[in-house]
Image (cartoon, rainbow, N blue to C red):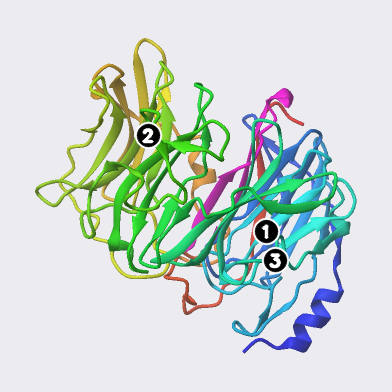
Amino acid sequence: MVDRMNIKENSDNNIANASDETASSHQGINIITVKPTCSVFTVQYCLLTHRDRQFVAFYDDERRITVGSRLLGHSHWAFFQPGGFWIDEKQRYSHVTEYDSHNYLTMAVDKDEYLHISGNMHVDPLIYFRSELPLDIFSLRCVKNMVGDRENRTTYPLFFKDHQGNLLFRYRDGMSGNGDDLYNIYDTQTRVWKRLLDTPLLNGENARNGYARLPTAGPDGFWHMIWMWRDTPHCETNNNLSYARSRDLVHWERFNGQPIELPITLSRGEIVDGAQSNEGLINMSQELGFDNQGRPVITYHRYDEKGFSQAYAARVEQDGQWHSHQLSQWTFRWDFSGGGSIPPDITISAVKTIGANQLAVEYHSKWCPPGVWVLNESTLEVIETQDCQPILPSEYLQPRQNIHPDAEVQLIPAINNDHRHGHDYYLRWESLPIFRDVFYGVSVPPSQLEVISIGNKE
């Protein structure tokens, strides 16, 4: 049980001292230290670059939501810890997390430059903070509701923007195996959220839930979305990789232009790969990219007829049907099952265009070295396998803080990397591995959270 008094006393001390660490440089890589962070479990943080500002949302060593900000070119951070509300079901405050790897943090800036933060939710009441002043972390306040309906069992919050720059918010209402995907849109004039749709976009019909990637803006003017269904909380029950597209995020259709009645259910959606439970689909490995002609290409993995895990690329071909093309020739099987978060033992990137009628797909697996498949765009056949070039030297990709022998490096890119400054930004820290959303069984000291800047020195 959480000690309410200790948390209340800690949350009252919201304004932390700004960091006086200095940036260091090595081979064109700048390291800006942020603050010690929680290392007892793996959960994703958020780094956002907006004009000349950078914001970070993470958990401190006492697992409290912490937000930092700095001016680009400066290593001096300011920190703020917004307070939350008490959650009876979890016996904790909303600004303090557990050991659940679903409880990531996400962040956005609206058209009027107000900050929005959400996260720390796994079938929990909506947890959402908004600033009362533009780009001001110290004015972040907990907002108990967005629209006030279907906000008691929320998971997977994500912000994104439409073509007009309006801020949208997607989340799941319900639970794994029984949930719906809901979309809200924010009005900057009234500072009020409302439903984008009168219905869920994905409806599990009380029998399943959809695991969707956010809609992706394609070069053809459409928003493209992919997802797979899951019948129970157990990950082996993922099934039916699916697709839909939309001009306006409100009216949805199949690839051939046939309208889809909302909400999208299993029977109404367009099936890309009809793999059933225990046939190797898993929601953490489905990516959407576009070829040189702007056509959507979906990459994913599932089991082949021999039961081995294999990577595939799917595309609508000249006959108007989805066709899956096998990319790998693996002889291993990722035999996943059960509930709770598990490590991604296979990851496959979205296709990237590399010109000359070719595409590239990067893959990683615990059973083989990482690599890059070069594809013939016309056939999606692998014509070459290349070595995978890491984004950072190996010393940054290996644990070096000695918090525990099992610790792993966490590395995520910034949202809205601002290439005007000639930099790519990444957030780096070290933590114990993903462990089914329960305590790993050992206590470890905090690790140092760092921003890594690749490019000319700030």
Q: Position of residue 395 (x, y in %)?
A: 52, 44
Q: Position of residue 451 (x, y in %)?
A: 67, 45
Q: Position of residue 182 (x, y in %)?
A: 56, 55
Residue 454 horizontal side relative to residue 56, left or right: left
In the rendered image, which quarter is residue 207 located in? bottom left
Element type at mark 1: strand
Q: Nearer the viewer, residue 124 or 164?
A: 164
Does the image show residue 114? yes
Taking the spot 73% from the left edge, 29% from the top edge, the residue there is 457
Labels 2 and 3: the sequence-earlier one: 3
Q: What amino acid is at disc 3?
A: Gly
What residue is disc 2 on?
362
Residue 290 horizontal side relative to residue 282, left or right: right
- In the image as oriented, which residue stretches furthest toward the left? 306
The stretch drawn in magenta includes residue 419: yes
Query: Marks 3 and 2: in contact by CB < 8 Å?
Result: no
Label 1, residues with CA under 10 Å away: few <14, some 14-19, many ≥20: many
Residue 118 horizontal side relative to residue 101, left or right: right
Locate the C terminus by quadrant. Answer: top right
Residue at mark 2 to residue at mark 3: CA–CA distance: 42 Å
Labels 1 and 2: the sequence-earlier one: 1
Closer mark to the observer between disc 2 and disc 3: 3
Residue at mark 3 to residue at mark 1: CA–CA distance: 16 Å
What residue is disc 1 on?
118
What residue is disc 3 on?
148
Q: Is residue 405 above or below residue 18?
A: below
Q: Nearer the viewer, residue 241 or 346?
A: 241
Taking the spot 78% from the left edge, 88% from the top edge, the residue there is 5
Region in magenta? 406-431
Q: What amino acid is at disc 2?
A: Glu
Q: Is residue 390 above or below residue 274?
A: above
In the rendered image, which quarter is residue 156 located in? bottom right
